[in-house]
Amino acid sequence: MPPAHRIRLPGPRWLVASALGLLAAAAGPPAAQAQAAWVPFPSQATLREVQLAALACARDNTAETCKRSRSLADPLLDHPRLPASCKDLLWSLSERSTPAPSNSFTRREALVAPAQSLLAVCRSREKPPEPAPSAQPGGSGSNSPIRLNSGGN
């Protein structure tokens, strides 16, 4: 009878190392990588450009103007900091920015309505940083009276 082969199981150290590796992978990227991935909020000028392109598509009903509207709205759909309500408007503009045989009121309004609310819905809700307080305590601030020397006492 041939000798029985033993199956060797990994030791407890291997299991602990594996568990720690899985936890580290699940925790996500390190803080340094997260800082590098920060993307600034789109400027009002960028959103205004999208709005004007969509309004031009609604007004002119040409392939060029509608293509421009889609090309400006599409990249913003993947923007990580825009709220879902803003992305819904951008999706609507992107989908409806196609030339039609007849530039009906319904077609124009389907583009104009989301374009008009784009700036209000997509604006940043972050508070601007507060200015640093004055380093001069009390006496020499702007609220202190100014004394002039009149020359002759």
Image: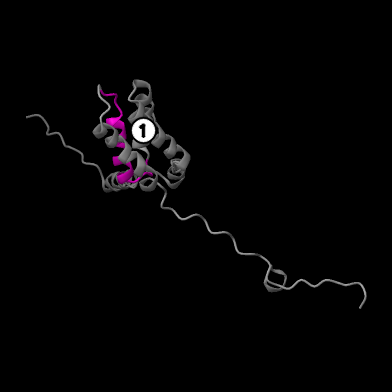
Q: Residue 43 lies in magenta, yes or no?
A: no
Residue pictured at 47% horizontal, 39% vertical: 45
Q: Residue 96 lies in magenta, yes or no?
A: yes
Residue pictured at 37% horizontal, 36% vertical: 76
Percent from the top left, x then y, of residue 107? 26, 32
Query: Disc 1 marks which residue?
Result: 54
Say which quarter of the image contains residue 2. top left
Percent from the top left, x then y, of residue 114? 31, 40
Where is 102 relative to 5, above or below? above
Q: Quadrant of the N terminus?
A: top left
Where is 141 relative to 59, above or below? below
**Is 117 left or right of 38, judged from the image as shown?**
left
**Magenta span: chief secondary structure:** helix
Crowd class of label 1 (few under 14; some 14 to 19; many from 20; radius 10 Å): many
Q: Which residues are magenta?
A: 80-100
**Is 101 left or right of 86, judged from the image as shown?**
left
Percent from the top left, x then y, of residue 106? 24, 34
Q: How is the image coloured?
A: one colour
Q: Nearer the viewer, residue 135 or 58?
A: 58
Residue type pointed to by label 1: Ala
Residue pictured at 69% horizontal, 67% vertical: 142
